[in-house]
């Protein structure tokens, strides 16, 4: 019974994964498509939420059972992993653009997230503005997170 339930959840979740992949900007870039539309990130969030709750239900249910029995095991490990991944993805959808997430643990338990952002120094903005006024092209080269680099570039008025 349990194996049949896992298989059913797997196949249904796999089918729902296909539109998620097709609507993902990175996948679209790889295959040369541009299917962007207003609210697409909320559609992606809804489909992903379905997979989290439907596909993850056995893990979440058994994680709760293991924790009630004070006997954390593999289901707890998987449950915590999918909760953290889903939590991070949710934070990204609802306004984390250009920030780095730090997980806060208290006594080895997830207590929350802190979103940190890079602040642009006033003198940096002034220097870039002076370069632009003198028709000098500016380009941002970074090894940092692409979203962080994009936010900093946007804040400085650097197009590339």
Image (cartoon, grey):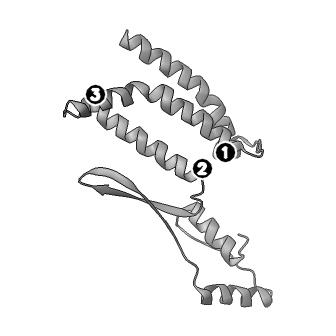
Taking the image as shown, residue 33 lies to the left or right of residue 3, namely: right
Tell me residue 65's x, y (percent).
28, 28
Within the image, what quadrant is residue 59 found in?
top left
Answer above or below: position of 1 versus 51. above
The residue that mark 1 highlights is 41
- Marks 3 and 2 sit apart, C-alpha to C-alpha, by 30 Å
Q: Which mark is residue 146?
A: none
Which residue is depicted at the point 68% across and 39% down? 23
Mark 3: give few (<14), some (14-19) or many (20+) Cα within 10 Å.
some
Closest to the camera, between mark 3 and mark 1, is: 3
Answer above or below: position of 71 versus 105. above
Tell me residue 123's x, y (percent).
61, 90
Taking the image as shown, residue 2 lies to the left or right of residue 31, namely: left
Q: Secondary structure at mark 3?
A: helix
- Of callouts 2 and 1, which one flags the residue occurring earlier in the amino acid sequence? 1
Q: Secondary structure at mark 2?
A: helix
Q: Nearer the viewer, residue 6 or 137?
A: 6
Which residue is depicted at the point 67% across and 89% down? 126
Q: Secondary structure at mark 1?
A: helix
Q: Nearer the viewer, residue 51 or 128?
A: 51
Which quadrant of the rendered structure holds the C terminus?
bottom right
Taking the image as shown, residue 2 lies to the left or right of residue 92, namely: left
Which residue is depicted at the point 76% across and 45% down? 36
Q: Nearer the viewer, residue 153 or 92?
A: 92
The residue that mark 2 highlights is 93
Q: Specify the farthest residue to the top.
A: 1
Q: Which mark is residue 65?
A: 3
Tell me residue 13's x, y (percent).
54, 25
Q: Specify the farthest residue to the left.
A: 70
């Amino acid at each position: 019974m349990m194996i049949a339930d896992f298989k059913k959840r797997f196949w249904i979740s796999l089918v729902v994964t296909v539109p998620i992949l097709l609507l993902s900007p990175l996948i679209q870039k790889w295959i040369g498509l541009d299917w962007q539309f207003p609210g697409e990130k909320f559609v992606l969030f809804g489909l992903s939420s379905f997979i989290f709750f439907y596909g993850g239900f056995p893990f979440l249910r058994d994680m709760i059972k293991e924790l009630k029995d004070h006997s954390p095991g593999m289901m707890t490990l998987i449950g915590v992993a999918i909760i953290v991944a889903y939590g991070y993805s949710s934070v990204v959808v609802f306004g984390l653009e250009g920030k780095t997430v730090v997980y806060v643990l208290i006594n080895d338990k997830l207590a929350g997230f802190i979103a940190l952002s890079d602040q642009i120094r006033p003198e940096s903005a002034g220097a870039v503005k002076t370069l632009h006024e003198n028709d000098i092209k500016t380009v941002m080269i970074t090894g940092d997170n692409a979203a962080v680099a994009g936010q900093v570039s946007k804040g400085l008025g650097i197009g590339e």
